[in-house]
Image: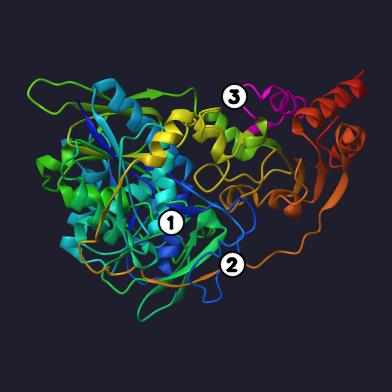
Amino acid sequence: MTNVLVCIKRVPDTGGEVELTADGQGVDARHVGFTISAHESCAVELAVRIATDTGGTATVLTVGTQDAVEQLRSALGVGCSAAVLVEADPAGYGPADIAREIAAVAGDYDLVLLGNDAADTGDFQVGIRLAYALGRPVVNGIRTVSVSPDEGTAGVATAQGAGPDGVETWAVPLPAVVTVLEGGVEPRYPTITGRMKAKKAKVEVVAPQAEPHGSGRVRLTLPPAQPSNVEVLGQGPDTAAAVVDLLQKLGVAR
Amino acid sequence: MILVVVEAGAAGVSEVSLETVTFARSLGAPVHAVVVGPIPDGAVDQLGTYGVEQVHHAVGDAFSAYGGAVWAAAVQAVHTDAGADAVVGPGTPRGMEVLAHVAARLGVAMAANVVGVAGTGPLRVTRQVLGGAVLEEMELPERPAVLTVAGHAVAAEPGPVVTATVREFTPEVAEADLVARVVSTEAVEELDRSSGLKSARVVVGAGRGAGSANGFDHVSELAELLDGALGVSRVVTSLGWRPHHEQIGQTGSRISPEVYIPCGISGAIQHWAGCASSRTIVAINSDEDAPMVTKATYAVIGDMHEVVPAINAEIRRRRG
């Protein structure tokens, strides 16, 4: 029976162009929606699978404002059974602050799953800092993880991910922390009953443990836009002859 | 002292590590390097040509298999011994991991994916956030400053040549740091093909637009017809559609072919970092506003699954 805590973050759904707020402190998300990262969607899926396989539970957590309840409910809709909101404005929180707040809740869980890096702040460190705060081992950037029972312990987490020389296998005793990269599992879609349940589920709200130290952010800027000099050859497959003409001119096609 | 965590494999010091050493020289002097595990032949001399004065080489049973914590223990030991003002690593998955461990152990901040120094006193760095779509200026007032350098954001340039000395050491490692290490590695097919990618005259690229693991037949064929290599974007390897050694970008290969033909690749900064040195770019994309299209030399607007087979057919037709 493995009790899993999976951590997510509400982030702007910036597919294309990004706009910044006037004070340069954040992304202007008025014209875009909000989501969680692909890594975290996979982490949620893995948490639900492990809870199902072991007869345990999957609890979803975020550090955020009341708005982030939307993302918690999405995770409840795909199989998480409980949700925790550490209510705070994450803009003032650095990765060490976030790790400390998660650690205050995570002590009772056998396995904590997080995304490898946040889609917006890209800090690449919350999971690792969390592991040190909890005194637990951490495996980073994996695609799949499962839990098998182990006599006299909380079980063993076996994880696989891509390393520089091939697919690496890791095995760590629980309790442990694991950070997830997208691609190992296909996140499921919420069912109608899942959505209904998620709507009614109670979200536990807790207060942060301490004042944040901050992220060190001075300001955000957009990289300068380069003028485009592209020559559009045309639309669709009818352009093939023009493309081959070009490739021949460039000396790379016979 | 500026301490650089260097990644070295059978092929020598990684290019991103040399970029990181180059960047480290802008932070101060002297520059030292720490290498954990085997050092390939010639690597020490090579680091010397990039201005590294001393290489700290961690050896011992603890380093027989990779683990973020145990690698960080070696880096931390060098800092404890020699006192680093900054600890800098490559912005690769392992570089990020090891440096995050180092920062957590030392109780200091870490800046990921740094591309430049915006100010000193206190140190202020510029780094990529939102996958490179936005830059953040971040203050790193603590010592040592811990940061990773975004891959292919800085060109690797040899520095004032010095003769690097090597100091072997075997740090004490706590039991807890040995718990999470790689148990086994299942090797992927030959790594030669990625070196083929780096030296190819023509590279055909494919991104999310391929649609699935089965969506690469036409681009592979085009690469073959042009005696070129196939390369892919990060999302393609993340989704497991293609092996990592085919990846072009910040965390993959940097290419500089005569002609690069990216198909169904939007052109995020992460990818652009690996292909910006291409001489001519012919983008094939259904979105005329995709960054890859606007940055390209030539573009075809259309579905890669329709355009690429038509190009293949045209090449075959002209050959008769």
Callout 3: chain: B
> Identity of the amino acid at label 1?
Asp
Up/down of B285 relative to B188, above or below? below
Residue B114 lies within the magenta run: no
Residue B48 in sight: no
Find the distance from the CA under tag 3 to the CA under tag 2: 34 Å
Closer to the eye: label 1 or 3: 1
Say whether residue B28 is left or right of residue A29. Answer: left
Question: Which residue reaches farthest left?
Answer: A152
Marks 3 & 2 on one chain: no
> Which residue has dot 2 on it?
A222
Percent of width and height locating residue B126? 47, 68
State how far apart marks 1 and 3 are (Cα).
Answer: 37 Å
Residue extending farthest bottom: B121
Q: Pointer 2 indicates a residue of which chain?
A: A
Q: Chain of mark 1?
A: A
Residue type, numbered disc 3: Ala
Task: Name the residue located 28 percent from the left edge and 37 percent from the top edge.
Answer: B66
Alpha carbon distance from label 2 to label 1 = 26 Å
Residue bearing mark 1: A67
User: What's drawn in magenta, residue-wise?
Assistant: B211-230
- The residue under label 3 is B213
Question: Magenta includes B214?
Answer: yes
Secondary structure of the residue carrying numbered label 1: helix
For the point 44% across and 58% down, the residue is A121
Residue type at tag 2: Leu
Q: Tell me the quarter of the image containing the C terminus of chain B.
A: top right
